[in-house]
Image: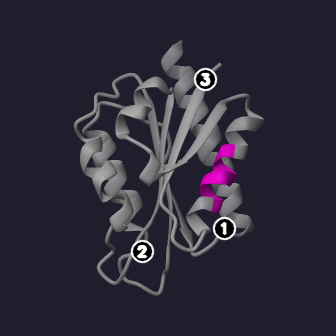
């Protein structure tokens, strides 16, 4: 059975909810999922999973990564995830010019690991609404298709 690890950073609970919604869609497809807060995770944890997902909010006017996920983010580039599938989801606020840049930052960091991008990142304005939930479902379905294509 395929396994997924979703590592998240959440200040208000919005990103944790996004991570849980994503996990539920993976579970519906028969994937074993672990959802872990970033302060309890190490990037090397991804090495034992098929799907490597980061979920982060974007902080402040400058579109910064949250302090609590910075170490995880920086250490990620040193991990070899060749043969793994990655994806990124996150929350932000369209009030700020730098909307959901944490998603873009993590996608760039995953590129350095040798992992294969499984789906386009999902950016959620504040909390997940109906359209966002539908986008998360497509995100998971696309990641699974990418994984299955890689296996064949």
Which image quadrant is residue 113 in?
top left
Judging by the rendered image, the residue that carries numbered circle 2 is 99
State the predominant SS element of the stretch in magenta: helix
Label 3 packing within 10 angstroms: few (<14), some (14-19), many (20+): some
- Residue at image coords 30%, 58%: 70
Front-most of residues 102 and 147: 102
| Residue 52 colored in magenta in the image | no
Is mark 2 in CB contact (under 8 Å) with mark 1? no
The structure residue drawn at horizontal position 28% and vertical position 33%, both measured from the top left corner, is 79
Q: Closer to the N terminus: mark 3 or mark 1? A: 3
**Disc 1 marks which residue?**
128
On the image, which quarter does residue 133 sit in?
Answer: bottom right
Where's residue 24, x and y in %?
A: 72, 45
Looking at the image, tell me whether mark 2 or mark 1 is earlier in sequence order: 2
The structure residue drawn at horizontal position 24% and vertical position 41%, both measured from the top left corner, is 77
**Residue 2 numbered mark, or none:** 3
| Chain part drawn in magenta | 17-23
Of residues 107 and 8, the one drawn nearer to the viewer in this rendering: 8
The correct choice, above or below, for 44 with respect to 130 in the image is above
Marks 3 and 2 sit apart, C-alpha to C-alpha, by: 32 Å
Decide: is 79 above or below 99: above
């Amino acid at each position: 059975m395929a396994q997924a690890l979703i590592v998240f950073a959440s200040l208000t609970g919005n990103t944790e909810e996004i991570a849980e919604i994503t996990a539920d869609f993976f579970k519906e497809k028969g994937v074993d999922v672990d959802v872990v807060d970033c302060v309890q995770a190490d990037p090397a944890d991804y090495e034992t999973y098929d799907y490597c997902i980061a979920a982060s909010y974007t902080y402040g006017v400058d579109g910064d990564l949250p302090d609590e996920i910075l170490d995880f983010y920086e250490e990620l580039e040193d991990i070899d995830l060749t043969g793994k599938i990655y994806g990124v989801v996150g929350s932000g606020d369209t009030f700020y010019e730098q909307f959901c840049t944490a998603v873009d930052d993590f996608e760039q960091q995953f590129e350095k690991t040798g992992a294969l991008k499984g789906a386009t990142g999902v950016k959620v304005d504040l909390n997940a609404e109906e359209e966002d939930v539908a986008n998360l479902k497509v995100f998971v379905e696309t990641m699974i298709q990418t994984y299955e294509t890689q296996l064949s």
